[in-house]
Image (cartoon, coloured by chain):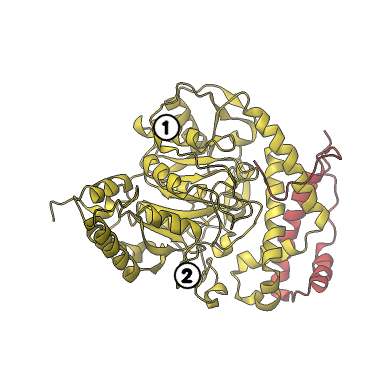
């Protein structure tokens, strides 16, 4: 065993510092990451493409630039990987599907991949996901299921299952993911890592395969709030290639990360968000609230209708996106995705329009709440990670399908694009749970400040999974 | 506030699925029909829940959300 630091498990912030001050070369960091991926990932199944040659060439270029005296950026030498709906030059953007892998290889990287690399990071691979992102489980009939690194017989969560699993398994310190209805927050909760779903429109989606244009978000996942903020800051900035991207200037979160919470009004979401879950889901929220000294609660109005409306818009927009593929190649879809998309295609237009009109009302009602509070806490999932292949569970005495209900606490929040950081809570020796730290639009920095405060207080943490056979 | 969700009768979704598939040019494999109809049932219930909420006529749709 070497006495040198294991760079494959180091935080992104430490890697960037060590690379920048010459303690380690990027090629060493990348070699350690690639070796760990080769050793560990066969058990986890989080990667669909390992980009060894690209990463090694990029590392050599960064080391050469540093030798010339050039500054490498805030993510110098940090390995990262991306959900396989991000364009990666030279790869077909499969988006978890069988059909898309027949596409021509992408000509260039997605906007957010380019931004992380411009900050000095090194792309090492593409990550597994539920087909076309219509998933909360991390299961995929084409690529095999992604396993939860903390309990290999359990779901990783999805649809960004590869992103959550790769971070939790210590394969990369940072991963990029997407969240339409909860696809960053559910795997963050199940895999016990931090995930940021920013405000709708904050981060460019250019060069990513869409699912539901009016609900799609991209964001980072990491094992610490500092690494999350570091990545998020590098990802920000307007982009005319994404029609929904904000023209607001970047608002870096890292400078405020240590500001504490003394000036923040924080409350727990009651009503809808305090029912339909296992007791430990609410115990996780209570643990976080206790660590923050929070006793008050607020009720987000009409959250059940909000979830229903998000469900309708998702089904209809997703089906419209895939209609030609459903006509020509329905048999090549994952059956669980195909059947929902076929039903979504048949939705009468007035039902969908009504859902979009309700969205306007609900947005205004929830924004009113943020006159009284700055941050709201809510469970991320109704339960811990179910077993792989589990199709039903019981919530509040009612048997429900797993696949459709893992997002019941995430959907009403992404529906109106609120920024959320999912923080990992470990109540006992069992699997982790997630708590959503929610703020008003454009206040990602508040979510990250609260997450960082909780981390420093020891209330939340994202340990690397102790995988069998791993050192 | 009215909530018609529980009151709306469930239509014949098997027949609807067959007609809608024809209109949309979708070949609905008989083996898939049961699952598609089950999903239509869930969507119909969601639509009833959303539709049961009274909205002012002036409330415009938010197809692309601007925060």
Q: Position of residue B32 (x, y in %)?
A: 69, 71
**In this rendering, would A181 be left or right of A106?**
right
Residue A45 in view (yes/no) = no
Image colour for chain A is yellow
Q: Position of residue A138 (x, y in %)?
A: 50, 59
**1 or 2: mark nearer the eye:** 1
Separation of residues labelled 1 and 2 (CA atoms): 41 Å
Residue position marked by numbered label 1 in the rendering: A256
Q: Earlier in the sequence, mark 1 or mark 2?
A: 2
Vertical comparison of A328 with A238: above or below: below
The chain holding disc 1 is A
Foreground residue among A128 and A114:
A114
Residue position marked by numbered label 2 in the rendering: A143
Identify the disc placed on residue A408: none
Q: Determine crowd level at label 2: few under 14, some 14-19, many 20+ residues with C-alpha closer than 10 A.
A: some
**In this rendering, would A267 be left or right of A152?**
right
Name the image quarter holding residue A56: bottom left
- What is the quadrant of the N terminus of chain B in the image? top right
Q: Position of residue A8 (x, y in %)?
A: 27, 55
Name the image quarter holding residue A64: bottom left
Image colour for chain B is red
Vertical comparison of A418 with A123: above or below: above
Q: Residue at x 84, y 61 (%)?
A: B12
Q: Residue at x 35, y 51 (%)?
A: A173
The chain holding disc 2 is A
Question: Could you say whether the residue bearing mark 1 is in a helix, strand or loop?
Answer: helix
């Amino acid at each position: 065993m070497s006495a040198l630091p294991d760079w494959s498990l180091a935080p992104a912030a430490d890697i960037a510092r060590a690379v920048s001050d010459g303690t380690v070369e990027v090629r060493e960091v990348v070699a350690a990451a690639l070796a760990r991926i080769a050793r560990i990932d066969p058990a986890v199944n989080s990667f669909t493409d390992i980009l060894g040659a690209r990463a090694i060439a990029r590392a050599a270029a960064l080391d050469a630039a540093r030798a010339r005296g050039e500054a490498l950026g805030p993510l110098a030498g940090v390995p990262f990987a991306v959900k396989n709906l991000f364009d990666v030059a030279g790869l077909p953007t499969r988006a978890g599907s069988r059909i898309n892998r027949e596409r021509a290889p992408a000509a260039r990287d997605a906007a957010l991949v380019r931004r992380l690399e411009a900050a000095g990071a090194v792309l090492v691979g593409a990550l597994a996901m539920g087909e076309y992102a219509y998933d909360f489980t991390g299961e995929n009939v084409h690529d095999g299921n992604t396993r939860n690194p903390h309990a290999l017989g359990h779901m990783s969560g999805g649809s960004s299952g590869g992103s959550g699993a790769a971070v939790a398994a210590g394969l990369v310190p940072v991963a990029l993911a997407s969240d339409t209805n909860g696809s960053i927050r559910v795997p963050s909760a199940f895999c016990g890592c931090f995930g940021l779903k920013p405000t709708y429109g904050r981060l460019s989606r250019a060069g990513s395969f869409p699912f539901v244009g009016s609900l799609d978000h991209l964001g980072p996942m990491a094992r610490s709030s500092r690494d999350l903020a570091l990545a998020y800051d590098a990802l920000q900035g307007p982009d005319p290639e994404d029609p929904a991207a904000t023209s607001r200037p970047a608002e870096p979160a890292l400078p405020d990360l240590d500001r504490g919470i003394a000036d923040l009004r924080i409350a727990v979401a009651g009503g809808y968000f305090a029912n339909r879950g296992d007791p430990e889901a609410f115990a996780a929220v209570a643990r976080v609230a206790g660590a923050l000294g929070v006793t008050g609660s607020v009720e987000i109005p009409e959250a059940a209708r909000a979830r229903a409306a998000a469900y309708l818009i998702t089904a209809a927009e997703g089906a419209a996106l895939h209609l030609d593929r459903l006509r020509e190649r329905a048999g090549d879809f994952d059956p669980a995705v195909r059947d929902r998309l076929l039903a979504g295609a048949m939705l009468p237009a007035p039902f969908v329009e009504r859902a979009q009109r309700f969205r306007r009302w609900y947005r205004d009602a929830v924004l009113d709440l943020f006159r009284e509070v700055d941050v709201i806490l809510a469970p991320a999932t109704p339960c811990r990670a179910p077993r792989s292949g589990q199709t039903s569970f019981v919530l509040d005495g009612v048997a429900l399908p797993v696949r459709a209900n893992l997002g019941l606490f995430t959907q009403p929040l992404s529906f109106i694009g609120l920024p959320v950081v999912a923080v990992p809570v470990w109540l006992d020796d069992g699997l982790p749970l997630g708590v959503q730290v929610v703020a008003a639009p454009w206040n990602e920095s508040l979510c990250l400040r609260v997450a960082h405060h909780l981390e420093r207080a020891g209330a939340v943490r994202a340990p690397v999974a102790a995988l069998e056979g791993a050192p | 506030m009215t909530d018609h969700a529980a009151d709306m009768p469930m239509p014949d979704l098997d027949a609807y699925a067959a007609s809608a598939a024809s209109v949309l040019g979708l070949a609905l494999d008989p083996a898939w029909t049961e699952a598609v109809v089950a999903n239509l049932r869930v969507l119909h219930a969601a639509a009833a829940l959303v539709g049961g909420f009274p909205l002012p006529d002036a409330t415009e749709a938010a197809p692309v959300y601007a925060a």
